[in-house]
Structures are given as structure tokens and as C-alpha cells.
Image: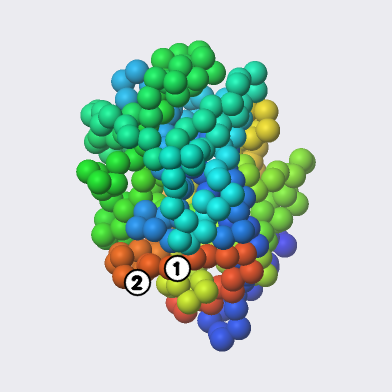
Amino acid sequence: MDKLFSLFSTSTGRSSSAPAATVTSIFIYPIKSCRGISVPQAPITSTGFRWDRQWMVVNSNGRALTQRVEPKLALVEPELPPDALDVNWMPSDSSYMVLRAPDMDPLKVCLTRACNVVDGISVWEWVGSALDVGDEASKWFTKYLGKPSRLVRFDTSLESRFVDPDYAQGYTAMFSDGFPYLVISQGSLDLLNELLKEPLPINRFRPNILVDGCAPFSEDLWKVTKLNNIAFHGVKLCSRCKVPTINQESGIAGTEPTETLMKFRTDKALKREKINKAKVYFGMNFVCAESLSASTMKGKVVKIGDPIHVLQRYASHADAAA
């Protein structure tokens, strides 16, 4: 544990002209709580990366189904058209998202399908309307999960889902838990894996951006950054739920990494003023300043290999929101 704190002390220095880190992986999660897709680049939109958390599985009451209660969702694998992440690509009537899951025939979801609007859809505190993808998708997920389920799509023409204004005002997301982007460093994962009996892959933590080249947990204190000349603001440490304990290849839950994170990634361990004994933190939630305006986000894309420059840091974890 002494090594942990000595490593962390190197991450709190002043910003410099040299990049603080480099983007090594980019992930999008088209369906909330289903498997992610590793991509070489992703365009910026007003709600996060294009296609990210645009769909969601709901129960008979319209409430979001996630891995917290349905860990089998981890095994649902979406596939988008090869060009879907190109900046200027637009879907046609022959463009599909294909879903695969164990013991299920593939399901094709047309990206341009006209859908009926359904009310009473909810995720966390948000309640609104969404687009019902149809009976075929409903039957597919109902069979797979063994309970009445439907697939819905966020309706950007009618709805806006704002992030918590206490942390970032004016920003929106689709069906993500709270914020458009989650950033984690390879150094943080490597250090955690040194403390675990069995190392874990990054998919346990479901980031949008994985970076490398910085000290462990440096991302905790990144307040204002430039990523390929795009402004990203770190607004809230990511408190972790049950999902990181679920093996994303089997859908089976365990106790790690939460047990180990409780030893050094709690409010008390990070010397934060407001202590919630049940919370552990791993990763930093970000918003993108350019996403507030259609003109400034037009054509903006994040790519693997992009450098990250830190323009402003939080002084300590006590200053970083959580």
C-alpha cells in the first residue's frame, strides 16, 4: 500500500506543455448494460460519443434493466455497421445493429426504423418517453431474460436528459448512468491488478476512454483537459456499483474488485469531507465543452493515439466532486 501512495503523489503536479497521457482505447455501449464495442475513433455528439447508450432494455413497467439485476445482459453483443463511427456516415434502410447472445438467433435492429413513442420510460431519476423498437426485439429480450422486456431507443426529437446540474450545467446524456464520458487510466487498472489475486480486464469498469502514460489515478484530478484540441472537463469521481464485480464474459458476479477498492478508494481513504462508507471510486466522469453547441462539436472526433493535455487540476480529492 505504501507503493500506492508514492505512485499517486507523482500525479498531482502542475500541468505542462507535454501530453499528460495518450488515448489507447475507445469504447461505446450502444445498449445500456450490454457489451461494449472497441472502436478506433468516435465522433462527439451533444450526448456523448455517437451511438453510446442510445438504446436500453426495459421491463414491463418501462423501468431500465441493467446488469445490477440482470447480469446476463453482459453477454448481449451489439455489432454496428463498419462505417457507423465515421464522422459523416448516415444510416440507410439497409443499416442494422445486429445483436447476439448465447443460445439466441441473431437479432437485426434497423437503424432507420420508424418507431412508436412510448411514455413512462425511466432510468434512475429520469422519466420520459422513448421509441419502442418493436415486437421482434421485445420477444427476443423476453426470451433471453425470461421476463417481459422491451428494447427502446432514446428520442432526441422529444426528450433531453440533463446531467446533474450540481456537477455540470447544461450538459445532456442519453441512457448512461449519469454523465456522457468515463475516463480511466491504464496505470489505475495496473495498480489495482497488482493488489488483486486475479487481475481484471478493463471491461469490468466500462469506460469510454482508456488512457496511458500517466501515474495511477491521475485522472481523478483532471479538471480541464484538451484531448486532440477538444475541451473535456472532469466533473465527478465515478462511484462504482455492483457491475465491476460481474465477469463480462460469463455474467457471473463475485466480490472483487469492490473488496479491494474498499481498502484505498473510499471517501475516508481519499480524505474527502463528506464520507459515505458504502462508496468506492474508480474512474472520472467527464463532459465535453464542445457538445454544448452544434457548431463547435461539428466534425469533432476522438481517436486512438490522441494526446491529452491537462490545463487545470483539482488540488486534491477533497476538491474533486464525487
Q: Position of residue 8 (x, y in %)?
A: 63, 66
Residue 300 bears which disc, if any?
1
Q: Position of residue 206 (x, y in %)?
A: 56, 46
Callout 2 secondary element: helix
What amino acid type is highlighted by mark number 1? Answer: Lys
What amino acid type is highlighted by mark number 2? Answer: Thr
- Residue hosting label 2: 296
Q: Position of residue 243 (x, y in %)?
A: 55, 36
Q: Is residue 180 above or below residue 318?
A: above
Q: CA distance from mark 1 to mark 2?
A: 8 Å
**C-beta proximity under 8 Å, tags 1 and 2:** yes
Q: Is residue 175 left or right of residue 244?
A: left
Residue 26 makes an appearance in the image: yes
Q: Residue at x 74, y 44 (%)?
A: 199
Callout 1 secondary element: loop
Q: Is residue 186 left or right of residue 56?
A: right
Q: Looking at this view, is 108 or 141 the one in front?
A: 108
